[in-house]
């Protein structure tokens, strides 16, 4: 047995499986089941998503978020098309070119916008920049909800983007790595944040919500899902023991843990933020709206935290430190972190 590491704030994918996920994993482990998604767990999880989103969507499961994004984007456009995303988007900065690879070359066009969010004006200016045959034709808008900077697209912002999309015949992809956190924070229904705002496809992340592995891809625009299972299979993303992705998803959906986990993570981040605001020399970089807190810390304080074995990222979005909370974050652990930040900041100030 290896030593057990305490909870960290580097990412919500540092966490383990939540109890509901483990429970359904073990239930699915009893006996045998048909392979490749022909099993009852997969059927029930698929129906569970249709119920949750109040619509008859097409549902697919893949192993990770990069594959979910890359394959779904590839399904929304041809290789000569382009995808408009924010310059900090995970599809641009953290997927090693997977969207371009999966789509045989669809180019990502980067837009700007405050707090990690694309604006209608930014999208419009990218679309208007060129309309000749020499330029890859914009076909998709990719939005991350919650964003890479931990902020949220409000419903009116989504509706304004849909308006641009409709005007220019663009499709809307949503990277929902932290979609549950967005729903939990906004108090809207999943439907209100997706297809009712014109989202054609959502990549709904299970891993960061409390699963071991597994993402759901939901096509609200069912026509775009044609032959998608072949795309998944060709990409090596069709799990033969599919029930070990779909059963834990069913666990999250049936018990409501998907929302409970996200609410917990958001509450933890709010608490962490409130504690950090009381420390002189700590600056919160972006509005804390979901489960991430971005702060600017003096370099010696960062070094001190690392010397105390804290793990966190400093390369996301800006020069700040990102602290990410998950279903497994505890108040005691937050208090330990805040205590060490206090010490580090005090030592750094003249
Ligand atoms: C974590 C994450 C993903 C998925 O990443 P994988 O490591 O491929 O599972 C996608 N988008 C965003 C914004 C993420 O934070």
Image: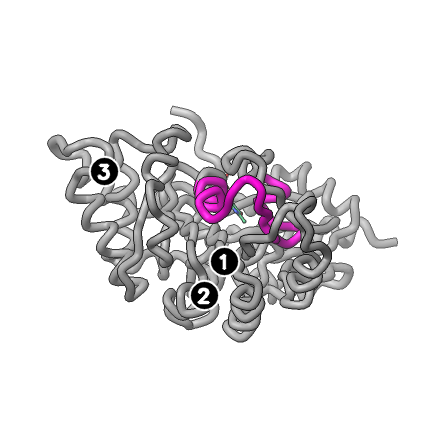
Q: Which residue is mark 3?
A: 37
Residue 85 location (% of width, % of height): 61, 53
Identify the residue at horizontal 25%, vertical 51% (top origin): 46
**Residues at marks 3 and 2, CA–CA distance in whole angstroms:** 28 Å
- The residue under the point 72% across, 42% down is 304
Residue 235: image x %, image y %?
Answer: 41, 30
Determine whether, in the image, residue 197 is placed left or right of residue 242.
right
Q: Is residue 128 left or right of 251 when viewed as pictured?
A: right
- Comes first in the chain, label 3 or label 2: 3
Dot 3: few (<14), some (14–19), or many (≥20) neighbours within 10 Å? many
Q: Circle 2 sits on which residue?
A: 198
Q: Earlier in the sequence, mark 1 or mark 3?
A: 3
Q: Is residue 63 left or right of residue 338?
A: left
Q: Establish whether ligand 1 lies closer than 8 Å to the Cβ of label 2.
A: no
Q: Is 217 covered by the magenta stretch? A: no
Q: Which residue is mark 1?
A: 172
Q: Earlier in the sequence, mark 2 or mark 1?
A: 1
Which of the pair 169/215 is nearer the observer?
A: 169
Asked if the residue at tag 1 contacts the one at tag 2, i.e. Cβ–Cβ closer than 8 Å, the answer is yes
Query: CA–CA distance between discs 1 and 3?
Result: 27 Å
Residue 101 is situated, as x and y percent measured from the top left of the image, at 54, 33
Q: Nearer the viewer, mark 1 or mark 3?
A: 1
The structure residue drawn at horizontal position 48% and vertical position 36%, both measured from the top left corner, is: 5
Quadrant assignment for the N terminus: top left
Q: Specify the farthest residue to the right.
A: 350
* Residue depicted at 58% across the width and 62% down the height: 151
Q: Position of residue 324 (x, y in %)?
A: 55, 51
Q: How is this picture coloured?
A: one colour
The magenta segment? 68-94
CA neighbours of label 2 inside 10 A, class few (<14), some (14 to 19), many (20+): many
Q: Secondary structure at mark 2?
A: loop
């Amino acid at each position: 047995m290896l030593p057990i590491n305490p909870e960290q704030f580097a990412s919500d994918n540092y966490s383990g499986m939540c109890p509901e996920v483990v429970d359904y994993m073990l239930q699915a482990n009893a006996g045998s089941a048909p392979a490749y998604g022909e099993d009852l767990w997969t059927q029930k999880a698929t129906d569970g998503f249709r119920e949750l989103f109040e619509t008859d969507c097409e549902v697919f499961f893949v192993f990770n978020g990069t594959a979910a994004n890359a394959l779904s984007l590839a399904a929304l456009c041809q290789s000569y098309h382009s995808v408009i995303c924010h310059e900090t988007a995970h599809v641009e900065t953290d997927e090693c070119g997977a969207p371009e690879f999966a789509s045989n070359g669809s180019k990502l066009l980067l837009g700007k916008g405050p707090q990690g969010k694309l604006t209608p004006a930014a999208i419009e200016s990218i679309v208007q920049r060129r309309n000749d045959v020499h330029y890859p034709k914009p076909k998709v808008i990719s939005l991350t909800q919650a964003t890479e900077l931990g902020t949220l697209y409000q419903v009116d912002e989504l509706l304004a983007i849909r308006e641009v999309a409709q005007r220019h015949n663009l499709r809307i992809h949503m990277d929902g790595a932290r979609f549950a956190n967005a729903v939990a924070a906004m108090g809207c229904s999943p439907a209100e944040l997706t297809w009712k705002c014109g989202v054609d496809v959502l990549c709904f992340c299970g891993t960061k919500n409390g699963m071991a592995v597994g993402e759901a891809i939901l096509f609200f625009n069912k026509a775009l899902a044609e032959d998608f299972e072949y795309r998944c299979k060709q990409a090596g993303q069709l799990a033969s023991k599919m029930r070990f992705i779909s059963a834990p998803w069913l666990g999250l959906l049936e018990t409501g843990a998907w929302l409970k986990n996200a609410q917990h993570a958001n509450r933890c981040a709010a608490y962490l933020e409130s504690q950090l605001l009381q420390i002189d020399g700590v600056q919160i970089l972006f509005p804390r709206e979901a489960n991430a807190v971005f702060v600017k810390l003096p370099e010696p304080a960062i070094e001190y935290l690392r010397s105390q074995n804290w793990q966190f990222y400093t390369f996301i979005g800006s020069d700040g430190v990102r602290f990410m909370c998950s279903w497994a974050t505890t108040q005691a652990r937050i208090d330990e972190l805040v205590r060490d930040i206090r010490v580090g900041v005090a030592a750094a100030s003249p």
